[in-house]
Image (spheres, helix red, strand yellow):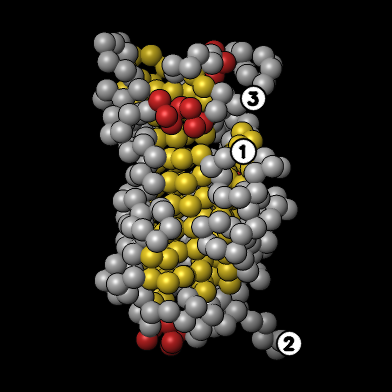
Amino acid sequence: MTRRNSQGFSHFTGATAPFLIGNAGLGAPGGKVFFVNSNTGSAARNLERPWFNQIDGETGFDNLQAAIDACVDSRGDVIYVARGSESVTETVAFNKTGISVIGQTWGMNPFARGEYTALSAAVSFTDGPVATITSPCFIYGMGFASRDAGALFHTGAAVLIGVPAAIGPFGVHMKACRFPKWGLTNRIGLSIEGSSNTMIEECDFEGAFASGIYIQGTAGHIQIRNNHFCLMTNAITFGEFSDVGVNTQLLMGPGNVTVSPTKFLNTDNKDGLGTVFGNYFGTAVGAATFDVDVANMETGGWSCVGNEYKTEDPGPT
C-alpha cells in the first residue's frame, strides 16, 4: 500500500518499515523513520502534524541525539526534524552509519532552511562543537551555531567532521545546511579532519568567522560546491595535510560564491592536490581572493580553472 504523510513524502507501508521514494539518498528498504520535535507546548508542536507531535520514545523524540541513538547502523534509517531551534548543552554525535537527517523545509530556499531548523549551543555550552560527524550520513536542511571560541580548529567550529588527529569518516554528505555566526564566539563554521569522499553543497556560511570551512589531515576526494560565503575572513582554510598530493584531493567548485571582502582560499602556502573551478568571487584575482598568487598555487598543486573575479573599475573612458 502507498500513502503520503503530512510532509508530502510518499512511502510504502506493510510488514517492513516505510521505504521513502522520490527523494534521492533517503532511506532504504527495511530502514525506519523517526521524528524529532524539540518545540515545547502543544501549539508549537504542530498538532495538525501528529507524527511531529507524538513524543513516545520509540519513533518520536524531543531531541535529535535520542533519535540518532534509536537508529541502527547501515539500516537506512531516516530522521525528520521539525522546524525550530534545539538548544543543546553537549555535542550531538552523528555516529550511526547510513542515516539521513532531514530538516523540515516549509518550501524555503535552501540557504534559509537551517535558520529555522537548527542545533544551537545553550548559553552554558561554550566548550566544543554542537555536532560531530564520525560516520557516513546525509544531513539536509539543518543549521548549526556554536559558542566555543577555542583556538584549535576542532574546538572553535560549529560542526566537526571526523576526530582530531585521526582518519575521518568516508562519504559524509551535507546539503542545504546553514552555518550562521549569529554574533556568537565560534571562529569556524565547519571543520573537516581527515575525511574522504565528503561533499558539502548548497550550504550557507554567514558571519564574521575566521573561516567558513577548515580542512586538514588525511583528507581526500572532498568536493565543496554551490555554497555561499559572506562576511568572513576566509571561505576555506587549509591546515596541516598528511600524504600531500596523494590523499589531499579537493574539488572546490563549481558554483561557490563569495561576497567581498571574504577571501575564498587560505592555503597557508601549503602544497596539495586540488582544483578551484567555476566559482564566482566578489574579490579581484590575486591576493584579494587567495593568500598566495595564482602562479604559486599552481606550483603547489592547486589549479585554478574558469573562475570569475571582480572586475576592477577602469575609471572614466
Tell me, yes or no, if residue 308 can be seen here. Answer: no
What residue is shown at x 44% (from left), y 23% (from top)?
Answer: 34
- Report which quarter residue 288 is drawn in: bottom right
In the picture, the quarter occupied by the N terminus is: top left
Amino acid residing under circle 2: Pro
CA separation, marks 2 and 1? 57 Å
Tell me the element at label 3.
loop
Task: Please tell me the numbered disc located at residue 39.
Answer: 3
Amino acid residing under circle 1: Thr
Tell me the element at label 2.
loop
What residue is shown at x 43% (from left), y 79% (from top)?
Answer: 270
Give residue 193's position: percent from left, percent from top: 41, 59
Task: Please tell me the numbered disc located at residue 316.
Answer: 2
- Report which quarter residue 309 is drawn in: bottom right
CB atoms of marks 2 and 1 within 8 Å: no
CA separation, marks 1 and 3? 16 Å
Residue 126 vertical placement versus 47 (above, below)? below
What residue is shown at x 69% (from left), y 17% (from top)?
Answer: 41
Find disc 1 in the rendering and name its residue. Answer: 89
- In this rendering, would 110 be left or right of 164? right
- Which one is closest to the eye, mark 2 or mark 3? 3
Amino acid residing under circle 3: Asn
Nearer-the-camera pick, 114 or 106:
114
